[in-house]
Every structure is written in C-alpha cells, then in structure tokens.
Image (spheres, helix red, strand yellow):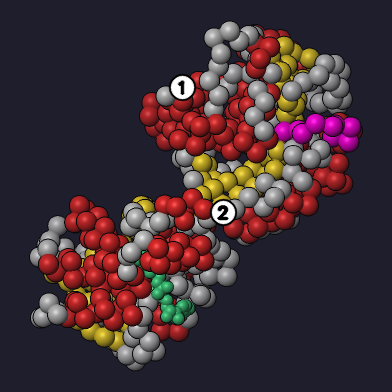
Amino acid sequence: MKIFTNDQIRSIEKYTIENEGVTSDELIERAAAAITCEIMSRWRQSKNVWVIAGQGNNGADALAVARMLLEQGYNVQVLLFNVFGRLSEGCIHSRKRLLDLGDVNFTEVTGDFNPPFISPDALVIDGLFGSGLREPLTGGFRSFVDYINESKATIVSIDVPSGLMAEWNEDTLRRNVIHAHLTLAIQFPRVAFFIADNAEFLGEWKVLDIELSQQETRNTQSRFFLLEKNDAKRVLRHRSRFSSKADYGSAMIVAGSYGMLGAAQMCARGALRSGVGKLTLHIPRCGFTVMQSEVPEAMVQVDRNDGGITEINLRHKYDAVALGPGMGTHDLTVRAVETFVNHAEKPLLLDADALNCIAERPTILNTIPPMSVLTPHAGEFDRLFGEHNCMEARIKTAVEKAAYYDIIILLKGYYTTVVRPDGRILFSCSGGPALATPGSGDVLTGVIAALLAQGYSPDIAATLGAFIHGYAGELAAETHGEYGVLATDIADRIGTAIRDIMC
Ligand SMILES: NC(=O)C1=CN([C@@H]2O[C@H](COP(=O)(O)OP(=O)(O)OC[C@H]3O[C@@H](n4cnc5c(N)ncnc54)[C@H](O)[C@@H]3O)[C@@H](O)[C@H]2O)[C@@H](O)CC1
Ligand SMILES: [K+]
C-alpha cells in the first residue's frame, strides 16, 4: 500500500473533484458523515461534545460533524477560530449549514479570548488544523492546543492531530501538538503515523474512506509504502509439491561468543522455521556440543578460537550469509569481520555485533557489498552513524546512508522501517510490544537470512522478514501475553505465521 505525502493527497483530491463529478463540499460532507458515524459508534448522546474548528477545510469537516451530531441529539458546543478573517470556502459553507439549524451553541473567535472550561469527561473534536498546516503552531494556537491537552478530555482529531505535520516533525515541539486519543484520517494514513516519535499524538488511528479517485490513487507514485498482510501474501511464494531442500537455498550464519551462544541458536531457529533449505552455523569452538544438540537441523562449523569468532572463511558457496548475533566486539572479531566484508562479493546480512564491529572500524562501511541488509536497533544505528534524538532523524540519516553506501537499512521498532538505496521507505505493520524481548532481533536475522537464501531480493526479504517476524510475535502474544513472550516462542510461530499470511 502506498503512503502519500500531503501534496499528493491534495492532487488526488483535486483530480477527484475535477474528474469524478464531486464537489469539494460533497467531500467534506462525506468525511463528516464517516467521522460522525465513528463517533456515534463509540460515544452516546449523553457525552458533552466540544467541536474546535479552524479556518481551513479541517475546520469545515469539524463544523459539518457538529451539525450532524446535533441532528443526532448530541449536546454540542462549537468554537470556530477565525482570527485572520480568512475562512476557506468549505468552512464558510459548513458554518452556514450549521447555523441554519438555529439555536446552536456557537462561538466564533476573532481575537483574544478566554478559553472555556472543558471538563475531563467531555469529548473534544479537533478540527483546528489538518493537512494544510504549513509550519509548527505558534502564539495563541499553540497555547490553546496546550490548554486542550491539559483539559484531560477525550480528544478525537480529524485527519491529523492539530499541530502535527503530515510527514516530518523534527522541528515540531511536542507541547504544540494535540495529543489525540483517536485520530480519524481522511482516506489515507500519513507518513507521520508510522514514525514511533508521533505515537503519543495519534493515539489509536483509523482511516475513513471518502472515495477519492481510485484511478488517480493507482497512478500516483510514492516513495513510502506500508506492507500489510495482503502485500506479504502477494510476495510469498507457494512451494512446489515436487520441490526438495535444494530449491530453498543455503544460508550461513556467523554468530555467537562465549556466553552468547543463545543468540546463534535463536537466529538458527528463526532461519529453520522460515524454510531455509540448508543451514550452516559458524560459531566459536566452545559452542559445538550445545549447538549440535540444541539445533540438530543445522550443520556446525567451528572457529579455531574457543570463545569468539576470529576467522570467517566459507568452505562452500552460500545463497545468503548473515553475520552478527551475539558475536561480541573483541578486536579479533572486528578484524575477522573486516577481512570477511572486504572480500565479500554478494550482499550480506549484517546485524547486532557485526554492526558494532563496523562501528569500531567505520572504514568497513565502504567495503560492504551493494544491496547488503543492515538491521540495527536504535542503539546500534547510533553507534554506526552518530547520535540521533528521535526515530525520524534516524530515518532521514538512513535514507542518506542507504543511498551513499548502496545498502538497505532496516530500522527495528514498531513499524519496522526498511530504507532502500533509491530512497524508498517501507514500513511493516505487524508486531507489538511482545517483540521487545531478548533474542527477538536474532530471530529476525534468521528469518531474513532464510528468505535471502530462498531467492527473495534483499529489500523484499528485509520487509517481508520484518512482517513475518512481527506477525509471529503477535501469535506468540496470544498465548503468552505481551509480557511473557520469549524469542524462541516467536521463532516457533514463524511457520504458523507464514501459513496464516498465505491463506
Ligand atoms: N483529503 C481530502 O480529500 C479531503 C480533506 N478534507 C479536509 O481538509 C483538510 C485540509 O484542509 P486545508 O487545506 O484547508 O487545511 P487546514 O484545514 O489544515 O488549514 C489550513 C489553513 O491554516 C493556515 N495555516 C497553515 N499553517 C498555519 C500555522 N502554522 N499557523 C496558523 N495558520 C496556519 C493556512 O493558511 C490555511 O488557511 C484535511 O486535513 C481534511 O480534514 C475534507 O474536507 C474532505 C476532503
Ligand atoms: K485536526
């Protein structure tokens, strides 16, 4: 699914109006009807409702919602902010239709005003600013937004929480943004919805369909994508009845050190549950016995060193090679990673301590084969590319670095984000807090390694891997709850996750 920018949504809206015989006011009515319906399904008429409208069409939506709720018997008070004397045509039209009802509790703010008391049990419909916001809020708007947030009322934002830019918000101050409990997006979710930093503003979010042109939606190109279950289904290949393990590729996982062999095990388990045809592990000598007994499905090749990885040599050809889980960052390991990466020709999968080793010797970055996949969590990312104070900043740096080094960067988190060298950004929408458990990342590396081995392209393997892993985590949480999931539980549900996604 494509995620559009504000400008693109605006042109899809314009196209719809110009080519599909619908007026802007009708779109406002459609949006308002859908929002009203959603509100009615959640709150009864006894709820005290405040509708806050701004000067643009977000305000027009809000005024139309106020009218519809009044018609449904809700007790509604309306505040329209018209401080610049520049209401949009839609807003003027919605105001007229609202006031035509007669006897409406309506205040139009045109200058300084004392905000009314909003009780904590009220419902606030936030239609102050939507996608037309051009810069972070300042002055009176900023104070009013802060005031609403402090009221502790339940807030429903129309389209986007007022004050939040639809795409990038690094310069937006948190206090100046509505903290919604529910965000009802019109037709499309926004890029900002998929960036962890903004979760506190959005609350729960839902997209409401107002039937903008499907044709124009199809024709509009985007650099942002969301991978949902159906997309994952489309890319996952069915297996032939006549296939053998030789058809599903061979993977090599270089992992583990004394005290961290569990990482290698979980990674292996992730790969095996993801259908890899043949798996070899390169581990320190001390892990040989335990690995052979714990992961009997894998072949084990040991390092000459007892406690860590000091030499990575591939004795055979592999379709995928993953480096990192639990490897540590001993000098000898850093050197082994450097030598190996220097000589590698095919894309690699680099995770965890492989990334930490690279952070110790950043020149290795210049030698990473094109289309390699790096899977850092926030800490590993910052060690590699410098400190960042938010996820958005990391995504922007990832875009730059992915292009510069010709690599794919997967940033772990809710909405795991995969950044391609061509600037495309893919968000995976599965998962949840159950995935925040030790070893979870090692399992993900195993999944991606297995998909690479089976011939999925590196960007698809990364995004699909993140989706499957997240989905398996959701399944594990059904049994063990968000607190109780172990990484091995995730690994053991990967097969079921793939089956569910495919059916
Ligand atoms: N996408 C669609 O097809 C539809 C969108 N609709 C609604 O229309 C909204 C967009 O409407 P608009 O484009 O009128 O935009 P807004 O309603 O977000 O407001 C734009 C107004 O705010 C002013 N403004 C921008 N930044 C400001 C700032 N920092 N401080 C003070 N004033 C500022 C602008 O000058 C402009 O007058 C959407 O969010 C959605 O709610 C609906 O009406 C139905 C159709
Ligand atoms: K809003």
Describe residue 4's horizontal placement relative to residue 33 as left or right. Answer: right
The residue at 74%/23% (across/down) is 319
Tell me the kind of residue under disc 2: Ser
User: Which residue is label 2 attached to?
Assistant: 222
Instruction: Tell me the quarter of the image containing the C terminus.
Output: top left
Mark 2 CB within 8 Å of ligand 1:
no
Work out whether residue 7 or residue 108 is closer to the camera in this orientation and state it.
7
Q: Which mark is residue 499?
A: 1
Which image quadrant shows ligand 1? bottom left
For marks 1 and 2, give the CA distance.
Answer: 30 Å
Q: Which residues are magenta?
A: 341-352
Percent coordinates x, y for residue 70 in the rendering = 14, 69
Work out whether residue 435 or residue 409 is closer to the camera in this orientation and state it.
409
Closer to the N terminus: mark 1 or mark 2? 2
Describe residue 343's horizontal placement relative to residue 44 as left or right. Answer: right
- The crowd level at tag 1 (other Cα within 10 Å; few <14, some 14-19, many 20+) is few
Is residue 286 among what the camera can see? yes
Tell me the kind of residue under disc 1: Arg
